[in-house]
Amino acid sequence: MIDISTAGRDFQDEILSLIRASQDTAVDALQAWASAVRYVTPSMAMVPYADLLPTPGTLVSEVYDFAGQWLSAQRKFANDVLEATAPLTGQGAAG
């Protein structure tokens, strides 16, 4: 008999592996592109107030920090809903 939990984890692992492979391909392509156009693009120094903008790394970190907090809040909400409806289903919230 198929263990649904194991099959689900295997499926998730396969999807994550495919995502990582496609991300690696995209990064390789972007590195090649950036190398090719590096000398024909304008400098950020030409953009007014560019020095006031956050760095791309800072921006990515802040966005992902927020997304992590939002996802954590969503998990808590979902577990609260499960707990509130447990008397109706006869099941408790999964940890």
Image (spheres, rainbow, N blue to C red):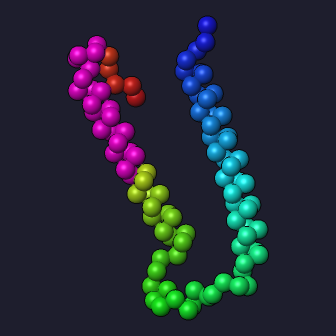
Q: Is residue 51 visible?
A: no
Is 61 left, or right, of 35 in this rendering? Answer: left
77 vs 58: above or below: above
The quarter holding residue 52 reads bottom left
Q: Is residue 3 left or right of residue 49?
A: right
Q: Is residue 89 magenta?
A: yes
Q: Which residues are magenta?
A: 69-90
Q: Residue at x 26, y 20 (%)?
A: 86
Q: Is residue 46 visible?
A: yes
Where residue 40 sits: x, y (%)? Answer: 71, 85
Name the one closer to the observer, 64 or 25: 25
Which quadrant would residue 43 be assigned to in this image? bottom right
Where residue 50 appears, x then y in whole percent?
49, 86
* Main secondary-structure element of the magenta-colored stretch: helix
Q: Residue at x 61, y 29 (%)?
A: 11
Left or right relative to 76: residue 62: right
Decide: is 70 above or below 60: above
- The C terminus: image quadrant: top left
What residue sits 28% from the left and 15% below the top?
Answer: 89
Residue 91 horizontal/vertical position (percent)? 32, 16
- Can you give x and y, in whole percent of width and height, for residue 51 in the image? 49, 87
Q: Is residue 71 part of the magenta span, yes or no?
A: yes
Above or below, 79 against 29 in this view is above
Q: Nearer the viewer, residue 43 or 86?
A: 43
Compared to residue 32, the image places residue 81 above or below, namely above
Q: Closest to the observer: 55 or 18?
A: 18
